Image (spheres, grey):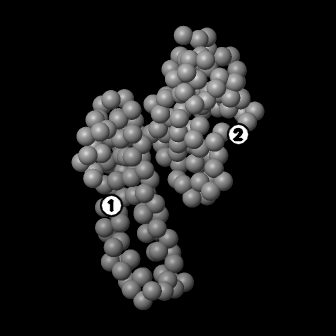
Amino acid sequence: MGKKSVRENKNIYFESREALGLTRAQASELIGTISESRLEKLETEKTLVHPEDVIDMANAYKRPELCNYYCTHECRIGKDTVPEVKVSSLSEIVLGMLSALNSLDSQKTKLIEITADGVISDDELKDFVEIQKQLDNIDMTVESLKIWMANMIADGKINGKKLKELQK
């Protein structure tokens, strides 16, 4: 097990490797596609990380949330289009989903009224924005559930092969 760095302002990739107690050499071997020198450059932000690097680190470190981090913080497209998801417990995710669905359920008639004519008028805009916020909350909880599932699969707590079979 390598010594912990005393460096301040470590990026998420650096912290993820260190959390496993791996040296860069060990991490490079575990990842299999990133050399030790490239890993050092990625961790010290001397070079830009590529999406395939993040996927490989996320898989090796068993940290699927690294992909969401990359999309929301480093990808030019994702920064504007992908919601940042916080890792949560299953109970928090389910309660958040139920809350968002209940709120949307109470606004469903309003949504039908607003959109029935295919036009959102100025006087309907405020209600539409509120409904859109509820839909965004649902999207966030779905994404959070996906990351939770990926973490459970990575940790061996859910059989990933069986899950994929059932999803077909």
**Position of 89 relative to 143 (above/below):** above
Q: Secondary structure at mark 1?
A: helix
Point 61% across, 17% down: residue: 25
Placement of 5 over or under 59, stated as above or below: above
User: 10 Å neighbourhood of mark 2: few (<14), some, or many (≥20)?
Assistant: few
100 relative to 10, above or below: below
The residue that mark 1 highlights is 101
On the rendered structure, is 95 left or right of 144? left
The label on residue 126 is none
The image shows residue 48 at horizontal and vertical percentages of 70, 40
* Amino acid type indicated by mark 1: Leu
Residue 82 left/right relative to 50: left
Which mark is first along the chain, 2 or 1? 2
Residue at 57% x, 31% y is 33
| Residue 41 sits in quarter | top right
Reading the image, the residue beneath label 2 is: 48
